Amino acid sequence: MIFDYDNMDKASSFSQMVIEKLIEIAENQIIILTVIRKVDNAFVNQAIAIHNHKIVHTQEKSKLFKLGDEDRYFVSGQDSKIKPFEINGIKIGILICFELRFKE
């Protein structure tokens, strides 16, 4: 994925607007997406799961793609936060893009 690194603040603001709208409309659906968010004055590539009008899971990308300069613009998440979660008896696990290449 290629990001417009010069406009990360705008992307983060747009992401927040999208999240708020999805929370508003997500009733019986499970919506999972990745967005750019600003956390503690740093940007993260974050997966968000939304269900029944609320965020039920978040997970930051932990394996940043250095060839795409992600490590220059994003803070990586913690590997320990990559774990399955459950919604209505359905187990869900999320890997974000490049993380698929790691067996651990």
Image (cartoon, rainbow, N blue to C red):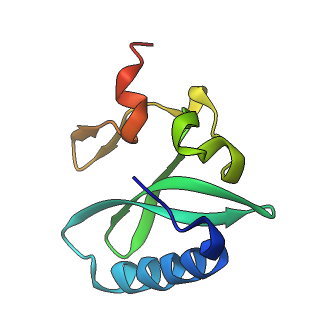
Q: Nearer the viewer, residue 23 or 100?
A: 100
In this view, the residue farthest toward the front is: 67
The vertical placement of 40 against 53, above or below, is above
Residue 104 quadrant: top left
The x and y percentages for residue 21 are 38, 86
In this view, the residue farthest toward the right is: 41
Residue positioned 19% across, 67% down in the render? 29
Say whether residue 28 is left or right of residue 16: left
Residue 32 quadrant: bottom left
Q: Nearer the viewer, residue 51 or 67?
A: 67
In this view, the residue farthest toward the top is: 104
Q: Can I make out residue 33 in this image?
A: yes
The x and y percentages for residue 38 are 68, 66
- Total residue callouts: 0
The x and y percentages for residue 99 are 42, 30
The x and y percentages for residue 54 are 42, 71
Say whether residue 28 is left or right of residue 75: left
The vertical placement of 42 against 80, above or below, is below
The vertical placement of 33 against 19, above or below, is above
The vertical placement of 101 against 69, above or below, is above
Say whether residue 20 is left or right of residue 90: right
Residue 19 quadrant: bottom left
Q: Can I make out residue 95 in this image?
A: no
Residue positioned 81% across, 64% down in the render? 41
